[in-house]
Amino acid sequence: MVTVRTYWSLAEAALAKSVLDNYEISAALLDENASLYSRGGQFAVPIRLVVDEAKAERAVHILSAEFEKADEIELREDVTITSGEEPENVNRNPWELLMIAFYLLVPAICLIRTDFPTYVAGRWGGYYVARATVAHFLSWLAVIGAVLLIIAYFRVRRSSLKSQTVD
């Protein structure tokens, strides 16, 4: 990690970090809480904005508002990646499928486990029972969808592992 800029204001440093995040350059703020430990500490220890060494030059150009130079650097990086082999650390794990399945499965199981009354007296009782029945039905559909997503995850994961070993 290389220090790209130093700031005396936490707000300016956070703004610069968010600009770099928008350009997909991972950045970190070091010593951002130094002003909390003692009064006047913000003037003793500046806040450092650090980025990866490979993206430091592009980050400096972006923070200096030299977007044309930053684009040239990005194009050079893209050409070297596309002309060479695929990067070794590419993550081919489709974990998003598991997260969607989780977010479908948890509320569905909670609704299935809820015991709704089978008979409700009153004018709107029949509608309440019908809504509970529809909620149970939709919960079972969500469980089936989650199971299908989990199966899709393992199939995609297995096929990506096979393609990695074939290469």
Image (spheres, rainbow, N blue to C red):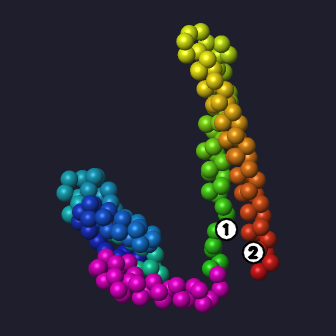
96 drawn magenta? no
Q: Nearer the viewer, residue 11 or 112?
A: 112
> Which corner quadrant of the image does residue 105 belong to?
top right
The residue at the point 74 percent across, 56 percent down is: 152
Task: Please say whether residue 57 is visible from this viewpoint.
Answer: no
> Which corner quadrant of the image does residue 18 belong to?
bottom left
Measured along the vertical axis of the image, is residue 20 above or below residue 87? above
Measured along the vertical axis of the image, is residue 43 above or below residue 36? below
Q: Nearer the viewer, residue 38 or 28?
A: 28
Task: Please say whether residue 37 is visible from this viewpoint.
Answer: yes
Three-letter code for the amino acid on which mark 2 is drawn = Gln
72 drawn magenta? yes
Three-letter code for the amino acid on which mark 1 is drawn = Arg
Query: Where is mark 1, residue-wise?
Result: 92
Q: Secondary structure at mark 2?
A: helix
Q: Position of residue 122 (x, y in %)?
A: 56, 10
The answer to whether mark 1 and mark 2 are in CB contact below 8 A is: yes
Q: Position of residue 89 (x, y in %)?
A: 63, 74
The residue at the point 55 percent across, 89 percent down is: 80
Q: Secondary structure at mark 1?
A: loop
Measured along the vertical axis of the image, is residue 144 above or below residue 161? above
Q: Quadrant of the N terminus?
A: bottom left
